[in-house]
Image (spheres, grey):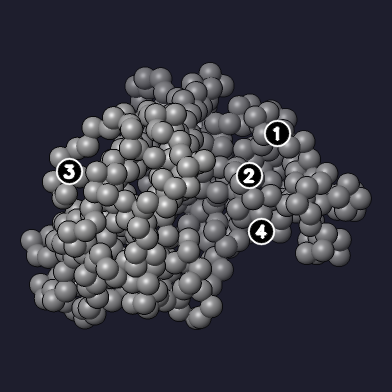
Amino acid sequence: MSEEATLDEFVDQDDSDDEIDNWPVARVKNHIELISGVHVKSDKVHRDDSSTPYLTGPEDFDGLGFTVTKYTDEPTKYCEPEDTLVTVKGSGCGKAAFSDQRACISRQLKALRPVSTVNPHYLYQSMKSKERFLETLSEGSAIPGLSNSHLTSLDIPVPDKEEQRKIATVLHNVDKAIQKTKEIIKQTRRSRTGIVQDIFTTGYFNHEETQDVRLGPVKTSIPEDWELGSVSESFRIIDGDRGENYPSQSDFQDDGYCLFLSANNVTDRGLRFGETEFISKKKDKELRNGRLSRGDIVMTTRGTVGNFGYYDEAVDYEHIRINSGMVILRPKGEVTCPEFYYHLFRSRIFQKQISAASYGTAQPQTSVTDIKKMRVAELSDEEKRKISEVIRNINSIIEQSEQYKDYLVSIKQALMQDLLSGKVRTTDTSIAVPDEIRQHG
């Protein structure tokens, strides 16, 4: 099956309950050996990759394998290649991963080792489809947890081995496409980091002369013909209205006149609107400062400090206000190309100024006074536009890849629901099963 295959390639058996009923349903315990992890003392865990990989939880899961950052010389309980790992304690309870290597596993994990009745890749996909259910089972205590019986008493359909192989192949191909897309995103982001770091210190055009400057805690060089100024010289910094009319929880609605920004909307990826809350036109009129105009830049100043959003024409919402943990940076009349400053504010060199001016541990924050003092470069309008164009194009590639990844994830969810339930059958479909799946029966 190709990575571009759709459900149309399969034989739809929605109206054939007898066919679906031919699949036996069995407890997971009938098809696995369950291996529990062990506790490894912290002084036995290190980063020397000449010893045994040590997996501690879902933070190590990476698609069809692992991102190993910890190792140990005293392993006692292993997962093996082709095992399915499930997180059974703490955050991420229920998350499943497919093992691609031998590794020591912590008590936060359990390995499900398939016996000959089930294909390892089919078992993994079956457990992957149970993640949300297992997460629900684990809730309700201070530390989420799953017992052995939570895992072993799960029911899974077990079709014949040929259909297991085909189902596993379809889902495996989508997993590989997701993993490949994630790698493209990762590499593009890495390239962007280097390009942004370089372009804000050397410029877009060839500058023959440079000057040494200090930007907060950072010593660097910039082109000789660039000038340095403070944020306050180029921007008005506007706080939100924090007075008696500040919205209470009862003022928020799922839909309404004015979008009221939260930390979920101003992220390290810019403005995002997956979760939104609104206030009425009446409540909006009661508030004073804090309403956005096109060309404004939003900065978070409390909690997660230094996330930025750019309110340009691409944003669909006409009426937006900031919350009490944000400020608006509004370009002064003579300032051109605010997009350039949005990219500059998000760059590593400017973020270091923000870190140096932040205070507090439980809830970090920074002040308007400190923001005003931060330093920014002033350069020609043409060079600002060129730099913005370069970064915008890279961001567009990343954004498109992110959207494609999300599309693949949604396809995977639909395929799991249909294929693992028997609603869509592979019986009469020609699917090339790769050796890595066929070799296990």
Q: Residue at x 28, y 40 (%)?
A: 166
What whole-number distance in Å separates the C-alpha atoms at marks 2 and 1? Answer: 10 Å
Estimate the spatial distance between the alpha carbons at disc 4 and disc 3, rounded to whole Å. 55 Å
Image location of residue 387, percent across then percent down: 47, 26
Q: Amino acid at mark 2?
A: Phe
97 to the left or right of 289: left
Name the residue located 57 percent from the left edge and 62 percent from the top edge.
303
Task: Report whether residue 357 is seen.
Answer: yes
Say above or below: 15 vs 226: below
Amino acid at dot 3: Arg
Horizontal and vertical percent position of residue 427: 33, 37
Q: Residue 438's mark? A: 3
Picture residue at 73% right of the left edge, 37% below the top: 317
From the image, tell me which residue sits under label 2. 273
Question: What amino acid type should be assigned to the residue bearing mark 4?
Answer: Gly
Q: Which residue is mark 4?
A: 325
- For this rendering, which residue is in front, 225 or 99? 99
351 or 432, nearer to the observer: 432
Identify the image quadrant of residue 308.
top right
* Disc number placed over residue 316 in the picture, else none: 1
CA gap between label 2 and label 4 equals 17 Å
Is label 1 in a helix, a strand or a loop?
loop
Residue drawn at x 47%, y 42% is 16
Provide residue 241's location: percent of width, then percent of height: 79, 56
Give the label, 2 or 3, closer to the camera. 3
